[in-house]
Amino acid sequence: MTNSPYFTLAPQGGNDAAAIENLLDLAFGTDRFEKSSYLLRQGAEPVRALSLVLRRGAVLCGTIRFWPVIVGERARALLLGPLGVHPDYQGHGGGQILMQAGLSKAHGLGHELVFLVGDMAYYNRAGFARVPAGQVTMAGKFEPERLLYTELAEGALEGVNGMMKKVHAKGQKE
Ligand SMILES: CC(C)(COP(=O)(O)OP(=O)(O)OC[C@H]1O[C@@H](n2cnc3c(N)ncnc32)[C@H](O)[C@@H]1OP(=O)(O)O)[C@@H](O)C(=O)NCCC(=O)NCCS
């Protein structure tokens, strides 16, 4: 899936969950669960086909996932995150590999609009821009200037307004 000489890109496997949580604790800290983007993931399921990992040999050193969300009444979109690379393996292009592969697969599956909460200085490399102030909001601890988007179909953000809400996994309640 990638021609990086350093990493192997692969779909997330059934036994990867513990290594991913460990990696995210190291990369983001254990207080990450308070963030607005985490609230949108509780009780939801990531899009399985877009859950990717990076390995170097047998070591899991990167992870990306995408979550289905609805903005306003009915605009469907994806929320990217968390994107994380193990501190020992950062700076080798892994973050960009995961993002480009994820976005390209999402486009292939017909998704048109992707949001994330993160540092503009990093994500603008992959084509993300700030959501215009007030256009889209999130519940919880929310820093509007960190809400970014990219369009996989031209004009996909046009007319998308309101609160971002999660799409519950089947059988889950609010
Ligand atoms: C952000 C992250 C995914 C990048 O992974 P990575 O594999 O190291 O990234 P890449 O190798 O693709 O890119 C590295 C480049 O991004 C830059 N970069 C990394 N984090 C950055 C940030 N928060 N803001 C701006 N630039 C950043 C590095 O300085 C480096 O720059 P260079 O290419 O000019 O040397 C990884 O550092 C990580 O998991 N960090 C912990 C979480 C975090 O801090 N996220 C911040 C964004 S929300």
Image (cartoon, helix red, strand yellow):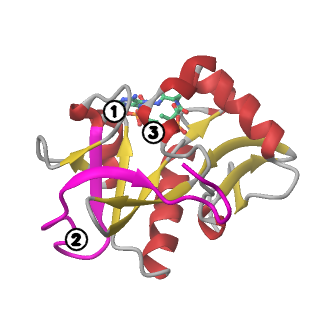
Neighbour tally class for label 1: few under 14, some 14-19, many 20 plus, Cα within 10 Å = some
User: Which SS class for mark 3?
Assistant: helix
Residue flagged by tag 1: what amino acid is it? Asp
Q: Of marks 3 and 2, which one's residue comes earlier in the chain? A: 3
Above or below, comparing residue 93 to residue 22 in the picture:
below
Q: Which residue is mark 1?
A: 119
Residue 152, percent from left and from top: 32, 71
Among the 4 quarters of the image, the one containing residue 146 = top left
* Numbered range of the magenta stretch: 147-174
Tell me the distance, in whole angstroms, between the alpha carbons under discs 3 and 1.
14 Å
Indicate which label's residue lies in the foreground, 3 or 2. Answer: 3
Residue type of the residue flagged with mark 2: Ala
Residue at point 42% right, 75% down? 107
- Of circles 3 and 1, the one toward us is 3
User: Mark 3 to mark 2: distance in Å?
Assistant: 21 Å
- At which x and y percent is residue 74? 31, 69
Q: Nearest to the eye among marks 1 and 2: give it.
A: 2
> Residue tagged by mark 3?
37
Mark positioned earlier in the residue sequence (1 or 2): 1
The image position of residue 170, as x and y in percent, is 65, 66
